[in-house]
């Protein structure tokens, strides 16, 4: 028997806001300055699982019957990072320095929509693997030093005026403003095939994205910077170049 119009209208409807996310779009960022809003992306990422747990306290007594009773004790968190070993990666240089000098590192775990957690961690293991028949890899064990934050949400990031102008005759850095200021540019690629490197070709601080004049000097014609702000948001910045 065919469904009636009323039965069809009463069928359950899946919430479109619920969807799985690709693990590749969750990224680990490393704090780069005393300003806890400035980060570098650790290059070559493959996996950065976050583990949160509570110590188990035995609360079993004669009144517990046939089953034991447990209470949650001290909370802790850790992360077991795995990725490629990238030479001259600035974020790894910070990790290596903090490990060698027994200093905590400030991290940001960023999810595909730009939301994130932050926290201080001690580096308790730092492994490089350089197999003769495979790619060089890196493993880092991070153990939380205090709490990791709740998930901090970020509004949909945007660039209000996505244009820059550069003149070789009066070479200056070019800037655009990203809002909200706690968003993070994940990558920048150009229409003519360049992949820009953070702290070499550009910098980012408190909502200001700066394209360095040293990079712009190499360009001889107009081009587009494709700035990826989340897994799903990419803004095209038009660049005009003149002699």
Image (tube, rainbow, N blue to C red):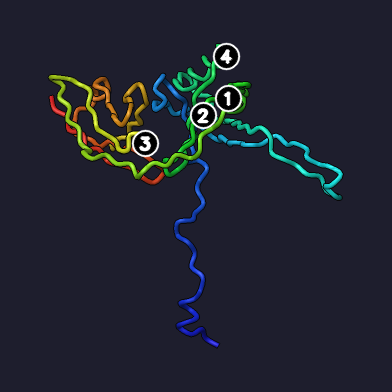
Q: Classify mark 3: residues with Cα within 10 Å, few (<14), some (14-19) or many (20+).
A: many
Q: Which mark is residue 7?
A: none
Residue at 36% x, 44% y: name it: 155
Residue at 36% x, 39% y: name it: 229
Q: Is residue 3 left or right of residue 113?
A: right
Q: Mark 3 highlights which residue?
A: 183
Q: Whole-Å distance between the Cαs marked 1 and 4?
A: 13 Å
Residues 128 and 54: in front is: 54
- The earlier-in-sequence mark between 4 and 3 is 4
Callout 2 secondary element: strand
Q: Is residue 66 above or below residue 109?
A: below
Q: Is residue 67 left or right of residue 234?
A: right
- The earlier-in-sequence mark between 3 and 1 is 1
Residues 53 and 207: in front is: 53
Q: Mark 2 highlights which residue?
A: 119
Q: Which mark is residue 102?
A: 4
Which quadrant of the view contains residue 172?
A: top left
């Amino acid at each position: 028997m065919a469904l009636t119009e009323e039965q069809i209208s009463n069928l359950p409807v899946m919430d479109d806001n619920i969807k799985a996310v690709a693990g590749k779009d969750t990224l680990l960022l490393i704090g780069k300055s005393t300003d806890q809003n400035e980060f570098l992306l650790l290059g070559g990422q493959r996996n950065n699982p976050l583990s949160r747990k509570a110590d188990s306290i035995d609360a079993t007594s004669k009144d517990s019957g046939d089953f034991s009773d447990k209470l949650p004790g001290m909370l802790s968190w850790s992360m077991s990072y795995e990725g490629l070993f990238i030479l001259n990666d600035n974020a790894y240089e910070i990790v290596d320095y903090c490990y060698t000098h027994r200093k905590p590192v400030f991290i940001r775990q960023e999810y595909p929509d730009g939301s994130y957690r932050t926290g201080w961690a001690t580096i308790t293991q730092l492994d490089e693997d350089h197999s003769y028949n495979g790619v060089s890899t890196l493993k880092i064990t991070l153990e939380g030093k205090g709490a990791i934050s709740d998930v901090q949400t970020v509004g949909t990031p945007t660039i209000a005026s996505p244009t820059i102008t550069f003149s070789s005759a009066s070479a200056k850095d070019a800037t655009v403003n990203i809002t909200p200021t706690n968003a993070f540019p994940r990558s920048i690629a150009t229409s003519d095939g360049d992949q820009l490197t953070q702290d070499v070709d550009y910098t980012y601080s408190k909502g200001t994205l700066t394209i360095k004049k040293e990079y712009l000097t190499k360009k001889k014609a107009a081009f587009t910077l494709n700035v990826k702000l989340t897994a799903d948001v990419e803004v095209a910045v038009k660049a005009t170049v003149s002699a």
